[in-house]
Image: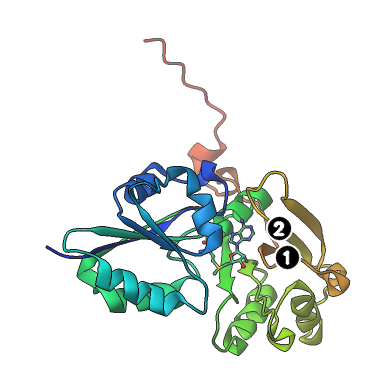
Amino acid sequence: MQKNLLIVGVGPGSPQYLTCIAMDAIKKSRYVVGYKFTLDTVESVIDKTRQEVYHVTMQNQESTYQYVYNKMKEGEYCTVPFTGDANFSESEVVDRLLEIFGDKNVEIIPGISSIQIASSKSMIPLDKSLVLSFHISGDIEKKKKELINAIMDKKNVILLPRPWPDDPSRNFMQSEIAKYLKLNGIDTSILKVWVFEYLTQYDKETIFRGKAIDLEEMSFNPLSVMVIDQNERHSYRDFDSPENKSPEIVLDNN
Ligand SMILES: C[S@@+](CC[C@H](N)C(=O)[O-])C[C@H]1O[C@@H](n2cnc3c(N)ncnc32)[C@H](O)[C@@H]1O
């Protein structure tokens, strides 16, 4: 018997993006421990008459995880819900949870990331993009160089900016990104960008489409994804196999 932890991606905010497997994980858990945004996302699945719910913040998360772990009995389940996909830009918390519970007691259930929604809305495939998260506590200088290199290589980039409300000098939001690109020799007057705020929250969602230079004087909510669009479309008809070129139509009359 063991104490079981379910690390669950719950999608970018709308319950419509909450998967069945995520809902099952939450329902079988005696404890649900998460940030407010994710707890709100899964609210309709939680039954407070039989489940204990803990709201964590950056300040109390360590003590709350420890408290719940010590309180859990053998065989019980705890879900920690994460926005989007738990495997993207969440490792600072996920790594600590793996440390507390031990890998063999943990299952990670993937979710639909904000990055995937931005990819769908901009019609830019993930496999033709560099995907970057600046939403981390550590040093971002190396990632900033990767960003420049990808743009120079004509790649698309889908990225999470870095909000740092307590110390704006550490912000790397859309306006800082646009200025940084210009400073590093990118012609931001022709570079196409998208910014998506509040994805999947239908009454609040916004889409900005323009050039990187426009972003210099704009400010966006921390809940946003930025896309650098250098996409070139190539369908199978662009590749020279004879089948791809042939207009032959085969009728199946059976
Ligand atoms: C700690 S990261 C978590 C990313 C998450 N694991 C994912 O897969 O989407 C938090 C950042 O994700 C982005 N994000 C998450 N949900 C979003 C949404 N609904 N709309 C726009 N951006 C979102 C924002 O950039 C936000 O600051």
* Figure quadrant, ligand 1: bottom right
Q: Position of residue 6 (x, y in %)?
A: 32, 60
Mark number displayed over residue 139: none
Q: Total label count?
A: 2
Determine which residue is flagged by label 2. Answer: 197
Residue 126 seen anywhere in this rendered image of the structure: no
Mark 2 or mark 1, earlier in chain:
2
**Label 2 element class:** strand
- Residue 222's quadrant in the figure? bottom right
Tag 1: amino acid:
Asn
> Which residue is outermost to the top?
253
Q: Mark 2 CB in 8 Å range of ligand 1?
A: yes
Residue visible at 33% across and 74% down? 67
Q: Mark 1 CB in 8 Å range of ligand 1?
A: yes
Q: Are the residues at dot 2 and dot 1 in contact (C-beta closer than 8 Å)?
A: yes
Determine which residue is flagged by label 1. Answer: 221
Q: In the depicted view, which residue is nearer to us: 186 or 163?
A: 163
Tag 2: amino acid:
Glu
